[in-house]
Image (tube, helix red, strand yellow):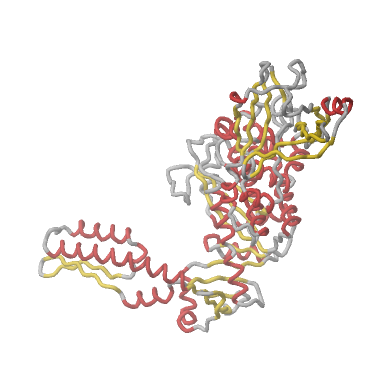
Amino acid sequence: MFLRANHRDKDGKRHTYWSLVETVRTPDGPRQQTVCHLGELNDSAQARWLKTIEVFNEVGERHQLKLFPSDIAPPPDDAEVAQVLIQRVRLERTRQLGPSLLGLALWRQLQLDEFFAGRVDGAEAEVPWSRVAAVLAINRLCAPGSELAIEERWYPTTALDDLLHLPDGTINDTRLYRALDQLLPHKTALERHLTTRYGELFAAEFDVLLYDLTSSYVEGAALKDPMLQRGYSRDHRGDCKQVVLALIVNVDGFPLSYETFEGDRTDVTTLETIMRLVERKYGHARRVWVFDRGIVSDANLAAIRRRGGQYLVGTRRTQLRAVEQALLDGPWTRVRDEVEAQVLPIPGGTETYVLCRSTARREKERAIRRRFSTRLEDALQRLEMRVATGRVKDRAVIERALGRLQERYATVADLYEMALRDEDGRLRLHWQLIEARRQWRDAREGAYLLRTNLEGQHAEDLWTKYIQLTEAEAAFRALKSELAIRPVFHQLERRVKAHVLIAFLGYALWVTLKHQLRRCGAGLSPSQALAQLATLQSADIVLPTTDGREIRLRRVAQPTPAQQRLLDQLNITVPAHLEWNAECSGDFAAS
């Protein structure tokens, strides 16, 4: 901003009119625009304008500026005026701002800053533990990594130190490990707090609970953690020890609770433990439990009934034989495009079967069966030819070859009859498709059977409740992919549990972002929103002066139109610059 002199000759006399001008950025480049016209100034008025004016920045801090006409150089001995060496202006300390700003906004919307501040910041510490918790959770959302990776690679590239007011050099792996120990004792209170916030922000209800389990393998021997054992690995890492993770979410994917179990714990043995924990945290209530067939047992269903609960669960495919006639003859009710269902009372009880059939699922299963059947038949023909030509004569060798084929194509091997016979002193291999089994496979493909004690509900309502189990599966996909809960590198039980807790916090941020994007109609997934904001950065503009000083201005890049639109939809304001502490990030001059 400066004074501009405009000259005009009138009646043989030269008049000077003054205007206040500032330089602004436009799509066409920098332009100068007039702020106001001052008219003619006498000597005293001109001196006052040339003196100083006071301006205020966004945080209310007062600064003084001096104005000089565009054709007049400032006095060289004025300490308040700096002449900048344009050719030596540089950019330093670029930091990724967008994802961190979004993660911190979600953290504060869930009031996790207040929750942890009231519980862990009472202990004397150089850095408040609540802010270290924010670093851990935001990392899990934006770029999940180990505590060492946070210190060395991720945190130094973000603007979290400015956003969280953290001094340089205070975030290291030791402080991050100690923060895990500080957070773990507050797991139950955290779950209750988040459940309340989900209700306040999204009117989330938890009367229908979706329950599922997964596992996460561990790198290392983990000799000091008895919870880590070898068991059924959903990660296909049977060579590693693992921890089993049980997660309870509502129909919208908001988590109610989670628990960790020993790595060799079978799914069916976890339900009653989970129900007791839920009742201890949230009290007794008439809840509806929805889970898959791997957790179903008569004992588990009886335990739910004893507690006055209700259930809608999957059943094993062998149960389809009990409803074979209904499967073949109907009547079917269309509940969705390509999905049919029918309700079948179970004789002698209060339970009901819900028989469902999906066209898309049938086509998929049929294509898989045909592919494996074709491969098995080709292999059987080749083996038959080798036996017939005498290339293979040993019965034990032939039987082992048949066993390998049955193991490799186990999904279709039961459709075929295979026999090795001795004919005229020579072995012959005979095989054929069992037509009755093929017909039954055709009939059952795409079909699945549900079991429930819910009363008075239509087939469409029951199918809709069960299919929402995909929200629990989506939660596990997010935990394992976007939030990278696996593998686990910790070797102590409390650290493994704390690692899962941080992943749970990351999922809380992720699912909140998911529903905010859905509510505002952004049409983006959480991953897409984070990627879109990844190029929004902050940086230091360094202005060397002729007197040997450097003026350092910490500024934020201008968001692109797409970024600004997304930020507006999420009601997030980008700060013009970051200057919480003038010693490290504010506007200041250094000698």
72 lies above or below 447? above
Number of numbered discs on residues: 0
Give the quarter of the figure containing the C terminus: top right
**Image-based side of 56 in relation to 344, left or right:** right
* Residue in the picture at 72% in, 52% down: 281
Give the quarter of the figure containing the N terminus: top right
Front-most of 349 and 64? 64
Front-most of 183 and 61? 61
Q: Where is residue 549 in the image (x, y as percent from the top left)?
A: 68, 18
* Residue in the picture at 66% in, 16% down: 548
Q: Where is residue 176 in the image (x, y as percent from the top left)?
A: 63, 32
Place residue 170 in its image quadrant: top right
**Image-based side of 34 in relation to 396, left or right:** right
Place residue 533 in its image quadrant: top right
Q: Where is residue 203 in the image (x, y as percent from the top left)?
A: 73, 60
Front-most of 48 and 233? 48
421 lies above or below 53? below
